[in-house]
Image (tube, rainbow, N blue to C red):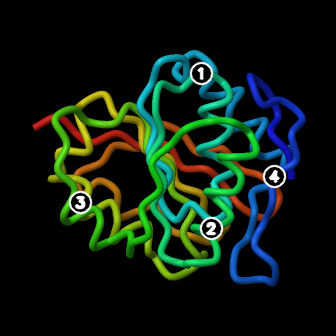
Amino acid sequence: MRVIAGKARSLKLKTIPGDSTRPTTDRIKETLFNILQDCITGCSFLDLFAGSGAIGIEALSRGANCCDFVEKNPQAVSVIKENLRFTKLEGSVFRADVFSWIASVRRERPYDIIFMDPPYDNLFEKHALELLVTSKAVGPDTMIIFEASEETPTDYLDETGYELVRIKDYKTNKHVFVKRKEV
């Protein structure tokens, strides 16, 4: 796994040994950032269920102003910090349960982009979205993207306060782009 573009281009990132995380492939990461290319420069980025931090690090490498990483696995948190040091990029790393962190986060400004890559097929993204809908971390222009298996339903989005912007399907998974509905 490597950084695709930007300041840290081509640098190889560490991953967590074993199968406790599922790194996003370089090809899928490149497609995601091609979609987001006009939004990254100068944005504030939040990487939930951050794993190795590869998505947030890619955002920083491509010009995001800041990135917060939230991950509860202590081994993964260490890998994120190592990857940030290695790439000479700066971000804030929070070792916390994503749901507890969302419930307690206090921000003056909402994030521009929130990315989450929870374990598949547990509807963790739904629970996170339910918490985010009233959070100060999300504003009317915040783009939220979650990675999920192809089988993951999205029919709950409307009832939880979100509008579907786009779904990008891959062979075995997808990226779902949503925005909070205006009240």
Percent coordinates x, y for residue 175 in the rendering: 61, 50
Mark 4–mark 1 Cα distance, whole angstroms, equals 18 Å
Residue where numbered disc 2 is placed: 78
Q: Residue at x 63, y 65 (%)?
A: 51
Query: Which mark is first along the chain, 1 or 3?
Result: 1
- The residue most toward the left is 183
Does 52 sit left or right of 142 as displayed? Answer: right
Q: CA distance from mark 2 to mark 4?
A: 12 Å
Q: Nearer the viewer, mark 3 or mark 1?
A: 1
Q: Quadrant of the C terminus?
A: top left
Callout 2: SS: helix
Question: From the viewer's perspective, is 41 left or right of 133?
Answer: right
Q: CA distance from mark 3 to mark 1?
A: 34 Å
What is the three-letter code of the residue carrying label 4? Answer: Leu
Q: Give the residue drawn at x 45%, y 24%.
A: 43
Kindly check if marks 2 and 1 are in contact, taking CB atoms under 8 A apart as contact. no
Labelled disc at residue 63: 1
